[in-house]
Image (cartoon, rainbow, N blue to C red):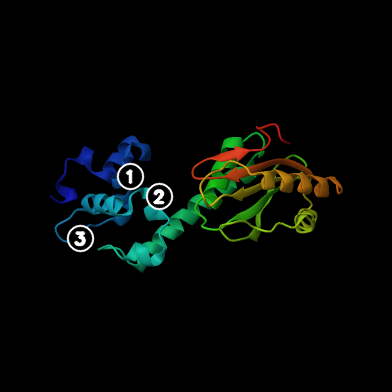
Amino acid sequence: MAICDWPSAERPREKLLAQGAGSLSDAELLAIFLRTGVKGKSAVDLARELLQEFGSLRALLTADLTAFCKPLGLGSAKYAQLQAVLEMARRHLAEQLARGDALTSPDLTRQYLLAQLRDRDHEVFACLLLDNQHRVLKYHELFRGTIDGAAVYPREVVKLALSHGAAAVILAHNHPSGVAEPSHADRALTDRLQQALGLVDIRVLDHLVVGDGHCVSFAERGWM
């Protein structure tokens, strides 16, 4: 049965408008994005098959072009649309964070860094540059490495912070393994960066390690 023949309260679009996006299942949300199904399958049926094939909504959203276009009904146009939606979500979080204080919005800071870093297949080291009221000036990715790690040079971090007039920074990097627990090397690096930035009166407020769906905060561990 086509979705247009379903009871109004069960149609994904009408359900979203009446109850909000949070009331929809992953398949229903994906069906709204797909808009149409294929011969013999509604958009919801197709969405369910895609989620089963990829294993999860996240796996579908982070698939590369080749993997995304392989299933029936998906092509490069849909891939481009999806990437645009994901980038809009990241920019929305960035704008929210830029309007507030990074220290009084720790959950938003985590969400933003998770959106930026959690799905990378290589290690990325980044900084949130803050003004003297701890408002975000800029997010910048400095170093990218292999899955085994990234070489981080304190002088480059200092240079970046000074060039933007930052009064403080929040450091962040991801663990592609998905395990967010900081290593001894992570702690040693943080100490070196604190010392280097301290010489030019720039505070390191936190270092967040991004794993698979969660972050570990050095500040909350009492390491800062």
Q: Position of residue 24 (x, y in %)?
A: 32, 40
Which residue type does callout 3 highlight?
Val
Q: CA distance from mark 1 to mark 2?
A: 10 Å
Quick one: label 2 or label 3, which is nearer the N terminus?
3
Q: CA distance from mark 2 to mark 3?
A: 22 Å
Which residue type does callout 1 highlight?
Asp
Residue 135 image-quadrant placement: top right
Q: Residue at x 83, y 45 (%)?
A: 198
Of residue 148 and residue 131, the one placed in the foreground of this image is: 148
Q: Position of residue 21 (x, y in %)?
A: 36, 40
Q: Is residue 174 left or right of residue 57?
A: right
Closer to viewer: mark 1 or mark 2: 2
Residue that badge 2 annotates: 58
Q: Secondary structure at mark 3?
A: loop
Q: In the rendered structure, find residue 38 and report the number of the disc placed on it.
A: 3
Q: Secondary structure at mark 1?
A: helix
Mark 1 closeness class: few <14, some 14–19, many ≥20 residues within 10 Å: some
Which residue type does callout 2 highlight?
Arg
Q: In the rendered structure, find residue 26 and report the number of the disc placed on it.
A: 1
Of residue 177 and residue 68, the one placed in the foreground of this image is: 177
Mark 3 closeness class: few <14, some 14–19, many ≥20 residues within 10 Å: few
Residue 158 image-quadrant placement: bottom right
Q: CA distance from mark 1 to mark 3?
A: 19 Å
